[in-house]
Image: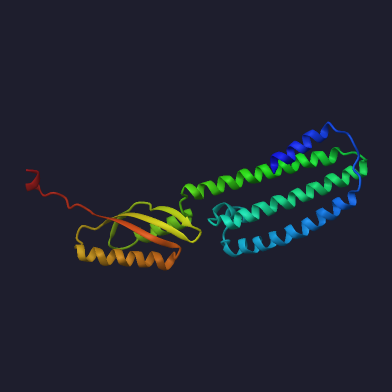
Amino acid sequence: GAGVSIYEGVTGLSQPGEMKNVVWNYAVLGISFIAECISWSIAFRKFLEQKKVNESLWQSLRTSKDPSLFLVLGEDTAALAGLLVAFLGIFFGQQFHTHYPDVIASILIGLILAVVSIYLVYESKSLLIGESADSDLVTHVHELVQSYPAVAKARRPLTMQLSPKEIFLALDVQFKPDLHASELIGIVDELEKKIHEQHPEVGHIFIEIERLKEPKSKLDHA
């Protein structure tokens, strides 16, 4: 769509003429604008429902893990911007009795579509090939595990966003050396329960268990 729009604009620069029957152009633009506004408002309301209180609109859009939401919102925003540019192109073309504003508007519409398309491709690609979970969630899980009494050290978790509301979590945890195997099983179960309670979007949890090695005695060194 971006390529065709730019091509039509560039070829139109070499074909002088004057716009006629602009009433139908305004009618089509008006109907399209109303339809896109309805679609955009629905997508924007859904977007606000998932937006965190402490995030800006741009941050929430960047961290969104639901492609069905930000794709529709991005496409509708580009469409509304394109309709506005098209209206201005027709309006100024009618005022100055030339077709140049219209063909320039066509090129600008193509550029808008291209920029939005590249952004949506970039955001979608990261989710398709495997994107980590939100950094705030990762930090909170790390602090939660690290503060547990039986944990001596925990590395920063590895995560993968499997779907908008499902996350795979891998933990490398080093427990204190005075714990028995039976105790470790109960502690791991309790850790998983705490993580699920505070972050229900975390589905699968893999915990690699390590215990601190006790220092060797002088006899062993001898």
Q: Nearer the viewer, residue 115 or 28?
A: 28
Residue 58 drawn at (x, y percent): 61, 53
Residue 207 locus on image (x, y percent): 31, 57
Percent of width and height locating residue 190: 32, 67
What is the number of callouts on the image?
0
Residue 213 image offset from top left, x and y in percent: 19, 52
Nearer to us in this view, 216 or 142: 142
20 over 38 or under it: above or below: above
Q: Is residue 207 left or right of residue 132?
A: left
The outermost residue toward the top is 14
Q: Residue at x 56, y 54 (%)?
A: 67
Nearest the eye: 205 or 9: 9
Q: Residue at x 51, y 59 (%)?
A: 164
- 125 lies above or below 181: above
Q: Is residue 92 left or right of residue 7?
A: right
- Residue at horizontal 46 percent and vertical 49 percent from the top: 130
Residue drawn where x is 69% and y is 54% of the image:
76
Quarter occupied by the N terminus: top right
Q: Identify the image's colour scheme: rainbow, by chain, secondary structure or one colour.
A: rainbow
